[in-house]
Amino acid sequence: MTRATRVLKAVRDREAGIAVLGLGHVGLPTALGFAELGWKVTGADSDAEKIALLAQGQAPFYEPGLQQLLSKQHTNKAFQLTGDIAEAIRTSSILFLCVGTPQRATGEADLTQIELLAQVIARNLNGYKLVVEKSTVPAITGRWIERTITRHLAAAFSNEDQLRGTKTGRVTQPDQGDFDVASNPEFLQEGTALADFFYPDRVVCGVDSEVARALLAELYEPLSRPILFTNLNTAELIKHAANAFLATKISFVNMVADLCEAVGADVTEVAHGIGLDARIGDQFLNAGLGFGGYCLPKDLRALIYLAQENNVDASLLRSAESINQSRVEQYLKKVHQALWIPRDKILGVLGLSFKAGTDDIREAQSLKVISALLKEGAVLRLHDPMAIENTKKVLPEQTGRLSYHSDPYEASCGAHALLILTEWPEIRSLDLQRLRRVMQLPIIVDGRNVFDRSELYEAGFEYFSMGRVDVHSWSNYVPRGEPSVAAARKAVQPCVHDISRRPNLTPRLTERLSS
Ligand code: UGA
């Protein structure tokens, strides 16, 4: 029996251990998920503070259900935590690499942490190991991991030979069967990471050996979900292509949103209409401020870089990126349309995280909007259900200019307008009458189209949203350069019906129209 088949048997008998190296937004849900499925798991991270927090049973970031699962696994002897990466490698047979792969200024993925980990694995290879990339990495990273481990192993063997005085002058080749590299990209979304772990649409495994294939099939067997086996490079590309496609889909609908505004259509209805086509699907067609977060922007850039490096036309992806970058500007235009001059206006800001269900603010579009409005001299009252603490670290409070409020109504107090920057369901279910009572002016500029327009009109708000013709809004219907009542009347003609049905919403406009 080879060492690899011994490990396979140990896995089948549930004796072999899994190490998850790196306990961030991917690693921690993965480690807890495998532990919950009954595997022996060691979670390792070189951040001592994080390990200390985890050891006390406290999750280092917010993710729905994560704290509960950690509290449960905390007492499970088969779930261990350590700050000693080398030790975790030595005591486990399947190693999941979940360290960060940030981006360089060029857009290229920075794989320094992956390379370092490969070196540590080589130094601690005390039996067969399956090395599994879970971090998002560009195609052919697996080959580099393989090469790095082999080189460092060879160097270690050669040094040992010399130390022993064998002086053979020959580099002892390590047993190539001692490790395999596989790719098992994650498709977890922040905010639903645990549900995505336990109920994935598919599990993708890039393998180049039968043992690697058998081990991964065994690991994921309890989930009873479809497993797609490919080669290593293909699995790596599936991950990047998936994120780039999602990003492109969002930019596509945002481009359509701009067109909707130009021709008087409604992007929500267009998205619904195209999404009913099973070939298109209805997900990731929400127009608004565009995509942020640690993954979509970074992975899109990494794929552009990879395409360029290989002389492949990346213009489609570059357009998706530039449409996304223009979203903040587009939104700020609406803020100006709504408020005229933001200086000294009090703005309640609802939503700071890059998306709902997380306290993560990395590459959040909200931060760009807030910084721009601060520069313009607006007074900002910020609220988020989860991300206040993280935002404070990058945007500290400024007396009289920038304050934080755990209560959304308090953030809206005295506001000349409310800005909606994240699609939290909590925001959608706010009491509109109460909001209206505490605000100075009933104006909402919704960057995520979270509200139903008719509800807002009925509640007496002026409402500005993305990719929809907001019929109630006076400023929208005064054509540029023609601020006369006659011109306005002409421009609002198609909307008169809507307005007359809600006469108390736009008193100024109604009065002028009926004069
Ligand atoms: C993304 C992918 O969706 C996951 O499949 C992947 O595993 C993950 O990256 C990763 O590579 O680790 P995530 O970054 O958690 O997940 O966030 P998404 O749900 O994809 O949302 C990204 C951004 O797009 C958010 O800012 C969100 O507000 C925005 N978005 C999303 C829209 O503007 N419109 C939509 O229709 C959907």
Image: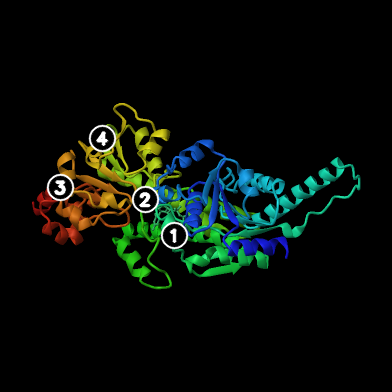
For the N terminus, which image quadrant? bottom right
- Of the pair 438 and 84, the residue shown nearer to us: 84
* Residue 202 in view in this figure: no
Tell me: is circle 1 under 8 Å from ligand 1: yes
Residue 234 in the image, given as x and y percentages of width and height: 61, 64
In the rendered image, which quarter is residue 140 located in? bottom right
Residue 357 circle label:
2
- The residue that mark 1 highlights is 196
Q: Residue furthest top?
A: 399
Choose the circle earlier in sequence order: 4 or 1.
1
Q: At 33% across and 45% down in the image, what residue appears?
A: 351
Residue that label 3 marks: 433
Q: Position of residue 186 (x, y in %)?
A: 52, 57
- Distance between the Cα atoms at labels 4 and 1? 42 Å
Residue receiving disc 4: 345
Kindly report which numbered mark, 4 or 3, lies closer to the viewer in this rendering: 3
Q: Earlier in the sequence, mark 2 or mark 3?
A: 2
Secondary structure under the numbered disc 4 in the rendered image? loop
Q: Secondary structure at mark 1?
A: helix
- Kindly report the distance in space between the C-alpha atoms of the residues bearing marks 4 and 3: 21 Å
Q: Amino acid at mark 1?
A: Asp
Residue at image x 70%, y 50%? 125
